[in-house]
Image (cartoon, rainbow, N blue to C red):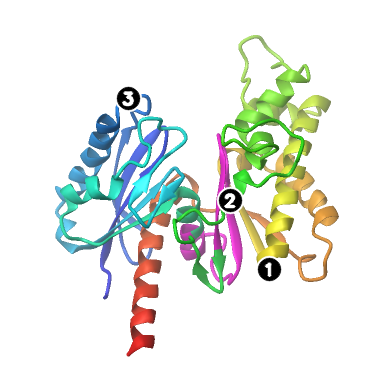
Amino acid sequence: MTMDLVAAVDIGGTKIAGALVDAGGRLLHRVQRPTPATESAETVLQAATDVVTLLTAHELWPRVTAVGIGSAGPVDARNGTVSPVNIPGWRDFPLVEGIRKTTGPLPVTLVGDGAAIAAGEHWCGAARGRANALCMVVSTGVGGGLILDGRLRPGPTGNAGHIGHISVDLNGDLCPCGGRGCVERIASGTNIARYAHHAGWRPATPGGDATAAGVAAAARAGDPIARAAFDRAARALAAAIAATATLVEIETAVIGGGVSQSGDVLFAPLRRALTEYATLPFVRNLEVVPAQLGTDAGLVGAAAACRSESDTFLAQGAAGT
């Protein structure tokens, strides 16, 4: 199948975005709606279908050959259902079925948002040309996806590479997922700010930025508590990245998301910590680089995941002939 345009949908707790994406990863038409995350399941679905309906109304829609969906997870690609932690109304929700009521018979690919971002960065971003990479989002949450042997490997349910819920502290805080000491519980933007506040950090001015971005600014200015918060997050990320590299021999770790915008406040201690955790010969040269696709990574990635699945299908078909 030669794929001309893909309709891509990116579903998160804050926004639902859609785009028509060409074979070069360019967004030719983009739409967005806020996610009514605290409302009913059907209300959230309506917001998603509104986005898709706007895409179907565009003059380029007749060129669309498939639909790719990247959703906050967990997802179940086998059954076409989603259970995003930050959209409580959706539990085992039949998202693919709901979207197909608008798109008709077009094939639909569903993956977790971390896998989508990995596919996007491999297609057009910082992991381009790399055969084995871990691509991560470090933001309100922490997620990720895997590129192995040059292909996206989302796993049977679409959640493979969800590094945010690897435990790096066996006696650590209880995570909302039910585990303890998860990477997300330590290294997400929310938890960087939480740790700094508990340690006594406050913005320099009343009403100042109390988020991870504010902590990053303070760390750049030399505040010891802010630096400690980022060092702690960096060590958690390094431990998880090193474990992943040891398991599947990745050569590159790509870090995106809001926390990655902290620059060397995050990347410098992360690279230092990697030298302590990635010690075996086959992981010592692991590189860590910032993501390149920015806020549209989920859309580019949803399209890329769709194309990746099509390529896999064609390869399997050729092998069977």
> Which residue in the protein does label 2 denote?
136
Q: Which mark is residue 39?
A: 3
Asked whether residue 290 is in view, the answer is: yes
Q: The disc labelled 3 sits on which kind of residue?
A: Glu
The residue at 83%/27% (across/down) is 224
Single out the residue that lies furthest toward the bottom.
Answer: 321
Q: Which mark is residue 249?
A: 1
Q: Secondary structure at mark 1?
A: loop
Q: The disc labelled 2 sits on which kind of residue?
A: Met
Q: Position of residue 34 (x, y in %)?
A: 33, 31
N-terminal label among 3 and 1: 3
Q: Please state if 279 lies on the left or on the right of 32 as rendered.
A: right
The residue at 79%/54% (across/down) is 274
Mark 3 and mark 1: Cα distance apart in space = 42 Å
Q: Position of residue 168 (x, y in %)?
A: 73, 44
The residue at 65%/30% (across/down) is 191
